[in-house]
Image: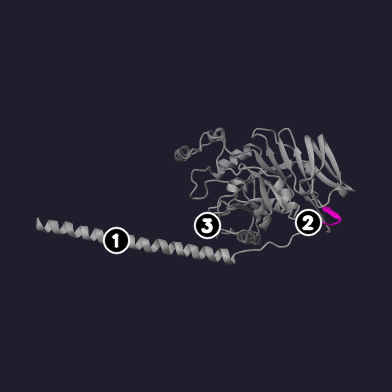
């Protein structure tokens, strides 16, 4: 009896010591880890930064037309960029690349760009065109960016806080790695305000059509400063519509996980937004080249099942910019510096604008029965 009580008392003593040591260890490890994070974050904020260079509006005797090298009357390629799949280990509930490729190809898409977090992925279906990509941004501010093409993915060194100069530094590293850089969903949690976008540099495009909000006027805000920023239109697809998901041959555990996470039964984010490239431009090299040149159109349909709007041929002929299309648009809007409407033509498939009316740049917004088409800017230059 005495020995048993002594044994119990001994175990209590050991448990007490273990608990004290555990809390002592935690009280030491946690602050040390937090200190290391703070030191690293402080170093990154202080030294990994890029100031904004001096800018001036576009000028020159000539007008650069990004659409002038291709014959758009030959047809168009429907491309979806910014798609998320189950390839990353911590998103098993998402759809597989094979299922997404099947769903999008069934809707007439001829090339896709997957953008799972932090590492490059491409399509698996050899019949589909592809451009490799990833999404940057593992931070509390929800500042994200897309990178298409390139040699390496750039980590997010700013999980807690990043100044505009820090983000510019990151985008510069992405550009130096050969990537085309897109600012993702700027309206989500106001991650990028217009002032931010004015002070951050080294990105190529902004998602002006996104499930988290549209803003085409931000293009004029930046173009008027002399920033040749392109449009981007994407579904930011995390899950397919329920009507499509029901047709997929998913494993039972994935369907259960999607149900638990409330992803089933929703409309989904797919098939409303896309880019249009010239006919046959569906491989990695062509898509990346066209992205860099701004030789693509941004499209947002009014609803997913709507007919795809057709894009026009834009040419510079003599002293005029001419637009011709097989589709008759409700309105053709010529938009210039500071968002000024230079000209609006209604109910037509042809339009033109005199070059003398373009001070620094002009871009087009085409309103059709089924959606909206945006062009990238034609800009003044001396070259």
Check whether the beta carbons of the residues at disc 2 and disc 3 lie within 8 A of each other. no
Label number found at residue 160? 3
**In this picture, is 57 found above or below 267?**
below
Q: Which residues are magenta?
A: 56-63
- Tell which circle, 2 or 3, labels the residue nearer the N-terminal end: 2
| Residue at numbered disc 1 | 20
For label 2, the SS is loop
Q: Quick one: quadrant of the C terminus?
A: bottom right
| Residue 340: quadrant of the picture | top right
Q: Secondary structure at mark 3?
A: loop
Left or right of residue 287: residue 238 = left
Q: CA distance from mark 1 to mark 2?
A: 66 Å
Other-residue count near label 2 (Cα within 10 Å), few / some / many at <14 / 14–19 / ≥20: some
In the picture, the disc for residue 360 is: none
Q: Residue at x 77, y 59 (%)?
A: 56
Spatial separation of the CA atoms under disc 2 and disc 3: 35 Å
N-term mark: 1 or 2: 1
Query: Residue 220: x and y, percent?
Result: 74, 49
Name the disc covering residue 57, or none.
2
């Amino acid at each position: 009896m005495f020995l048993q009580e002594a044994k119990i008392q001994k175990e209590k003593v050991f448990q007490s010591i273990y608990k004290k040591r555990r809390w002592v260890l935690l009280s030491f490890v946690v602050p040390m880890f937090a200190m290391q994070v703070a030191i690293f974050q402080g170093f990154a904020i202080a030294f990994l930064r890029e100031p904004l260079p001096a800018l001036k509006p576009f000028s020159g005797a000539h007008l650069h037309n990004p659409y002038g090298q291709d014959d758009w009357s030959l047809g168009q390629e429907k491309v979806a960029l910014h798609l998320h799949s189950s390839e990353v280990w911590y998103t098993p509930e998402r759809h597989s690349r094979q299922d997404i490729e099947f769903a999008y190809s069934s809707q007439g898409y001829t090339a896709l760009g997957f953008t799972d977090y932090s590492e490059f992925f491409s399509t698996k279906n050899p019949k589909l065109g592809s451009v490799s990509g990833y999404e940057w941004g593992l931070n509390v501010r929800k500042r994200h960016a897309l990178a298409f093409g390139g040699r390496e993915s750039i980590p997010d060194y700013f999980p807690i806080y990043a100044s505009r100069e820090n983000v510019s530094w990151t985008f510069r590293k992405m550009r130096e790695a050969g990537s085309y850089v897109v600012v993702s969903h700027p309206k989500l949690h106001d991650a990028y305000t217009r002032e931010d976008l004015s002070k951050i540099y080294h990105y190529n495009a902004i998602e002006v059509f996104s499930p988290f909000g549209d803003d085409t006027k931000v293009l004029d805000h930046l173009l008027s400063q002399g920033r040749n920023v392109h449009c981007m239109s994407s579904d930011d697809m995390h899950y397919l519509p329920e009507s499509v998901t029901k047709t997929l041959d998913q494993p039972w555990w994935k369907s259960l996980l999607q149900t638990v996470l409330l992803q089933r039964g929703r409309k989904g984010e797919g098939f409303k937004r896309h880019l249009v490239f010239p006919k046959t431009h569906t491989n990695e090299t062509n898509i990346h080249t066209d992205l860099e040149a701004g030789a693509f159109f941004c499209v947002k349909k009014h609803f997913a099942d709507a007919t795809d709007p057709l894009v026009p041929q834009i040419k510079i002929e003599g002293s005029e910019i001419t637009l011709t299309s097989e589709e008759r648009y409700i309105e053709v809007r010529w938009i210039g510096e500071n968002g000024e409407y230079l000209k609006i033509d209604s109910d037509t498939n042809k339009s033109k604008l005199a070059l003398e009316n373009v001070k620094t740049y002009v871009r087009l917004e085409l309103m059709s029965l089924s959606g909206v088409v945006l062009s990238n800017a034609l800009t003044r230059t001396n070259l």
